[in-house]
Image: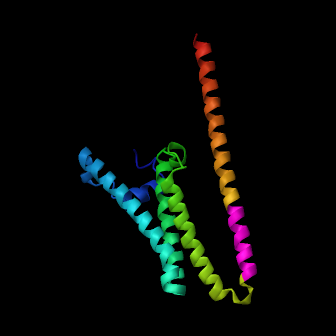
Amino acid sequence: MSRFTMSRFIRAMRFVGDLDDEFYDDELHRDVWNEASAVGFQLFVWVSLVAAAILPWVAGIAGSWTSVGVLLVFLSVATAVLGYTRARGLDMHTSQKLTRARIYGATGIYLLGAGSAAVTLLAEYGGGNTRSIAAGASIGVCAGLAAGIHGIVRKRRLEREDEARAEQEELLELEKEG
């Protein structure tokens, strides 16, 4: 891939991953390192989520703020990974089944950590208005989930429509040739 056709994001991620090192010239090295990196990323995911879920309970306010920081780092790294794969032509949301136990588990632990931090911080900083803040947060969570579900359903519908359009164009091409 030419350096001129790569986006700044791809160049930055290649630099972070040191992907131009001669180590990657050997196919076995690259495969083993890619598997090890995948294991490392998944370990990071699970340790981060579990730590973020436990910290508010064991360390109070300081743990809650730390949990928020851990979750933000988690989201940043996950977004960079997904963005890199998408920029390289692979959409992980369409190429794998999202309704798996591990995804539900990770989402549940994430929500437990975020919710625990939010409750602890609301209790500390919410003053006497904790109920209305909690009600607003509940409404926000529901609206966010609904928007997320809508976005996923819409994206899948648009992809099916694109596939059907591509198939139709292919059939028209075949008819013109034949």
Q: Tell me: residue 136, above or below residue 13.
A: below
Q: Tell me: residue 17, above or below residue 178.
A: below
Colour mode?
A: rainbow
Q: Is residue 101 left or right of residue 146?
A: left
Q: Position of residue 14 (x, y in %)?
A: 39, 56
**Between residues 142 and 25, which one lies in front from this camera angle?**
142
Q: Is residue 161 magenta?
A: no
Q: Which quadrant of the view contains residue 138? A: bottom right
Q: Tell me: residue 55, above or below residue 81.
A: below
Q: Quadrant of the N terminus?
A: top left
Q: Is residue 68 left or right of residue 44?
A: right
Q: Position of residue 172 (x, y in %)?
A: 63, 19
The answer, for residue 8, to whether it is visible in the render is no
Q: Quadrant of the C terminus?
A: top right
Question: What is the residue that sits farthest to the top in this orientation?
Answer: 178
Q: Position of residue 108 (x, y in %)?
A: 55, 63
Residue located at (29% from left, 47% from top): 31
The answer, for residue 74, to whether it is visible in the render is yes
Residue located at (72% from left, 79% from top): 133
Q: Tell me: residue 54, above or below residue 140.
A: below
Q: Position of residue 175 (x, y in %)?
A: 62, 14
- Give the dominant element type of the magenta stretch: helix, strand or loop: helix
Residue located at (66% from left, 41% from top): 157
What is the count of numbered marks?
0
Residue located at (35% from left, 61% from top): 40
Q: Is residue 137 magenta?
A: yes
Q: Is residue 126 left or right of residue 178?
A: right
**Between residues 163 and 53, which one lies in front from this camera angle?**
53
- Give, as a single range, the part of the protein colored magenta: 131-144
**Between residues 174 and 157, which one lies in front from this camera angle?**
157
